[in-house]
Image: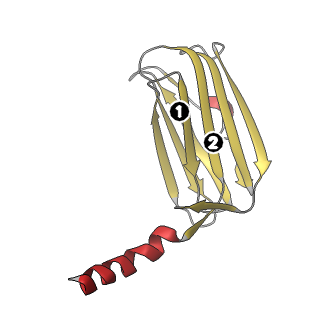
Amino acid sequence: MKKWLAVVLWLFVPYAQADNALGQFIQINTRFHSIVGHPTWLLIIRDVQNGQILPYLFDIRSKNNFWIALTFGHSYRVTVSQLQFNSEQQIDNFCALQDGVLNGISMTVNVSGDLTTDPTSYRCHVLKYRDMASTLIT
């Protein structure tokens, strides 16, 4: 039994301690005064180097949120940034993130104000910065 447990641990421990090289990331912070309805934010990222599609769906249920969207390559494109309030009301290119191919650039997105269907009720502040070597330690 001890040998079996040792083999199982030997198989899984290297993966748990390995460094996973990542590409770029998008950090999202929200600080809303109020939220209308139960919106969801669909963010779809396409890795330009290998064609990998990375969908993220964020349910906005609280005023203060912190999310990270990871990529696995250094060149990516945000193909969809859509805020959906219900089946009929949506904001396309939310926070103007659909802005062409980004190479070696990560982003921090801060969204504040009142989250409504009126684009003048909230503010997006997007900071883009060069970040060539992101590493996630698990």
Of pointers 1 and 2, the one earlier in the residue sequence? 2
Asked where in the image residue 66 lies, by quadrant, the reply is: top right
Residue at image coords 42%, 16% = 37
Which residue is farthest right?
Answer: 130
Asked where in the image residue 125 lies, by quadrant, the reply is top right
Question: In the image, 38: left or right of 73?
Answer: left
Q: Which residue is mark 1?
A: 82
Residue at screen point 60% across, 23% down:
31
CA distance separating discs 1 and 2: 16 Å
User: Which amino acid, by three-letter code, is at mark 1?
Assistant: Gln
The extreme front residue here reads 2
Indicate left or right for 83 with 25 as reference. Answer: left
Does 110 sit left or right of 20 as displayed? right
Viewer can see residue 66: yes
Above or below for 94 versus 35: below
Q: Which mark is residue 27?
A: 2
What's the residue type where badge 2 is placed?
Gln
Label 1: few (<14), some or many (≥20) within 10 Å?
many
- The residue positioned 63% from the left and 51% from the top of the image is 25
Number of labels in the image equals 2
